[in-house]
Image (cartoon, grey):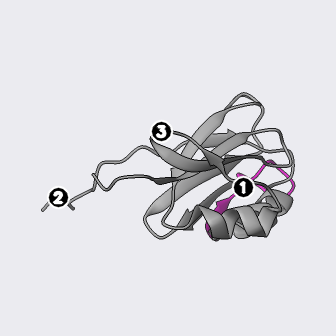
Amino acid sequence: MTERVDEEVIPILRVADAAAAVRWYARLGFAARWEHRFEPGLPAFVEVARGRVRLFLSEHTGDARPDTLVYLRVADVDAVAAEFGVRVEEAPWAREVELRDPDGNRLRVGTPRHSE
């Protein structure tokens, strides 16, 4: 019998220090779920999750490019803005903030104006 797999997209973000990145993403409500290294001392590949939202954080050089942009839709952008000390911007489709992680990856975080 084949196991049912939910289809999804999981962005991969390049990070220099996975442990530092996991700490930064924890401020956004993400928690580390697992980490893989081919051998001790080799680059890490980590999954972080916030509810059903997941990201892969990779220390592997060829996995992703810096300055990637990921959009994260949340229920309360004001809480995120308060955690990071930034101002919420008003857009026609959502209230948003834009953050940069320690490796320069961009996260646009928003609360939609209207339910879908």
Q: Is residue 77 left or right of residue 58?
A: left
Residue at horizontal 64 percent and vertical 35 percent from the top: 69
Q: Residue, x 77% and y 69% (percent of image)? A: 83
- Cα distance between the residues tagged 2 and 1: 28 Å
Q: Is residue 66 left or right of residue 57?
A: right
Q: Are marks 2 and 1 in contact (CB under 8 Å)?
A: no
List the residue tagged with mark 2. 2
Front residue of 2 and 66: 66
- The earlier-in-sequence mark between 3 and 2 is 2
Q: Position of residue 21 (x, y in %)?
A: 79, 57
Q: Name which quarter of the figure residue 18 lies in.
A: bottom right
- Whichever of labels 2 and 1 marks the residue nearer the N terminus, that label is 2
| Circle 3: element type | loop
| Residue type, mark 1 in image | Arg
Q: Residues within 10 Å of mark 3 (few under 14, many from 20)?
A: few
Q: Identify the amino acid type marked 2.
A: Thr
Q: Which residue is mark 3?
A: 92
Q: Identify the amino acid type marked 3.
A: Pro
Query: Vertically, is 32 above or below 46?
Result: below
Q: Which residues are magenta?
A: 32-44
| In magenta stretch: residue 39 | yes
The image position of residue 56, as x and y in percent, is 60, 50
Q: Which residue is mark 1?
A: 37
- Taken as a whole, is the magenta stretch helix, strand or loop? loop
The quarter of the displayed image where residue 82 is located: bottom right
Please say whether residue 21 is one of the residues in the magenta stretch: no
Residue 107 position, x and y percent, is 66, 45
Distance between the alpha carbons at the discs numbered 1 and 3: 43 Å
Spatial separation of the CA atoms under disc 3 and disc 2: 44 Å
Question: SS at mark 1?
Answer: loop
